[in-house]
Amino acid sequence: MAMSLSGAHRAAFRREAGREGRVFSIRDPEGMPAPAGDDGRRAVPFWSKPTRAGRVVDQVAAYSGFEVLAVDVDEWLDQWLPRLEKDGMLVGVNWSGARATGYDLTPAQVRQWFADEPAEDAELELPGRS
């Protein structure tokens, strides 16, 4: 079964954020973007590499002029996610493409996902390997 592109971005986010020890967002003088999705809920985007965030700034007109912001993963998990949760926001994960779209998770799902690190890694192993 093939993984969707956004599913692949989600898996890459978890793997890369763990390796980098940081996540990245974008901001301008007004703050960080939090566009509403199809369901009306707002999501703040985060990327697992500065190059991914920079590509969106370069290629998506709505984010032209934004700067890339690095956040330590532990600070993000301990301080940012609770604040996003309190504000009723979702977490956008490695958005990409002409309209900067992708996978949105609740802060609780993201925390669980980082807590379940071994299970996530096991999912990435090739079949037939021990």
Image: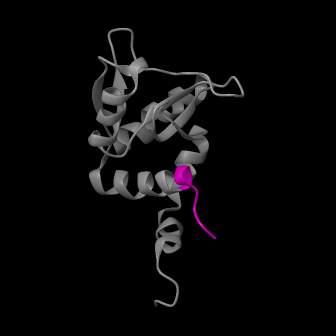
Q: Quadrant of the N terminus?
A: bottom right
Horizontal placement of 32 versus 91: left or right? left
Quarter assignment of residue 23: top left
Q: Nearer the viewer, residue 67 or 98?
A: 98
| Above or below, comparing residue 81 to residue 2 in the picture | above
On the rendered structure, is 48 left or right of 116? left
Give coordinates of residue 57: x percent, y percent. 33, 27
Instruction: Return the x and y of residue 86 as percentages of the image width and height.
Output: 59, 25
The one nearer the camera, 106 or 27, is: 27
> Where is residue 48 shown, x and y percent of the image?
36, 46
Asked if the magenta segment contains residue 78, the reply would be no
Residue occupying the point 46% across, 32% down:
98
Residue ranking furthest to the right: 39
Residue lying at 35% horizontally and 29% vertically, measured from the top left? 59
Magenta range is 1-7
The colour scheme of the drawn protein is one colour
Q: Quadrant of residue 113?
A: bottom right
| Residue depicted at 32% across the width and 9% down the height | 29
